[in-house]
Amino acid sequence: MSDKTEKTSSVGGMEREYVIPLRRNWNKVPRYKRANKAIRTIKEFLVRHMKIRDGDLNKVKIDRYLNEFVWFRGIRKPPARIKVKARKEGDIVKVELFELPKELGFKKTKLEKRDKKASEVVSKKKAEEEKAPEKAEETAEEKEQQKKEADEETRLSEAESKKASVVEAGKEMEKVAAKTMKHQTKISKQPKRQRRMALQK
């Protein structure tokens, strides 16, 4: 198995870059299992090369963008080889793509922006909740007045909605009556032509 390795020392642990050949292994399985086999091949390769002694594949954690890159063309057409960056932290090996393609890079930035916005919204809500007890000291009279105003508005809106519904119902009934009149056949009292009478003998 040919692999290009670059060893770099990092503070957290061992960090390496590999080009992992996949085609040789995914060619051994049926087409509808190729992408699964490619993922398994990446894990087996890293277990062997990153010195995971017990050979446990669960200790290799694959990045979501690496997984997406393997599955990008579907289950039948995974890439033939892939360049990855592996970092060992304790017993666990974390793997990610060496370089993100444009599509995945765009998606990553989009998701990061979304997460940032969500965190900002959460922090704003917390700040508002902290200020809420100060505003809660409003007098009971003001609250009662607000309730009365709200009740009056609801009554007025209910009355208006009832009037509008009555008017609409009347219009609908007129339409139905017009339709029935249109489709009724007109019965004339006199026959169109005289009946033929039997000739007298």
Image (cartoon, helix red, strand yellow):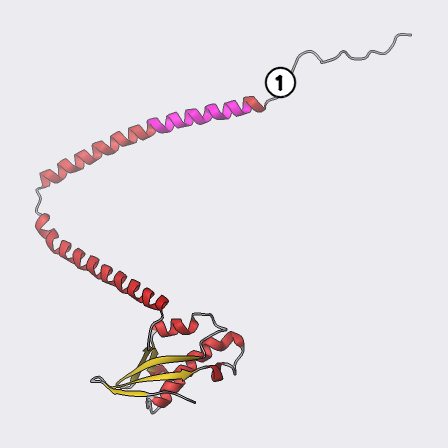
What residue lies at 14% left-to-right and 37% top-to-bottom? 144
The magenta stretch spans residue 99: no
Q: Quadrant of residue 139?
A: top left
Of residues 18 and 45, the one nearer the viewer is 18
**Left or right for 72, reference 201:** left
Count of picture labels: 1
What residue lies at 48% left-to-right and 84% top-to-bottom? 24
What amino acid is found at the position of numbered circle 1 in the picture? Lys
What residue lies at 71% left-to-right and 13% top-to-bottom? 192
| Local crowd size for mark 1, using a 10 Å CA cut-off: few (<14), some (14–19), many (≥20) | few
- Expressed as whole percent of the image width and height from the top left, the position of residue 125 reads 18, 56
Q: Quadrant of residue 54?
A: bottom left
Tell me the quarter of the image containing the C terminus. top right
- Expressed as whole percent of the image width and height from the top left, the position of residue 194 reads 76, 11
Of residues 54 and 115, the one nearer the viewer is 115
**Left or right for 181, reference 1:** right
What segment carries the magenta color?
A: 163-180
Determine which residue is flagged by label 1: 186
Tell me the quarter of the image containing the N terminus. bottom left
- Expressed as whole percent of the image width and height from the top left, the position of residue 152 reads 21, 31
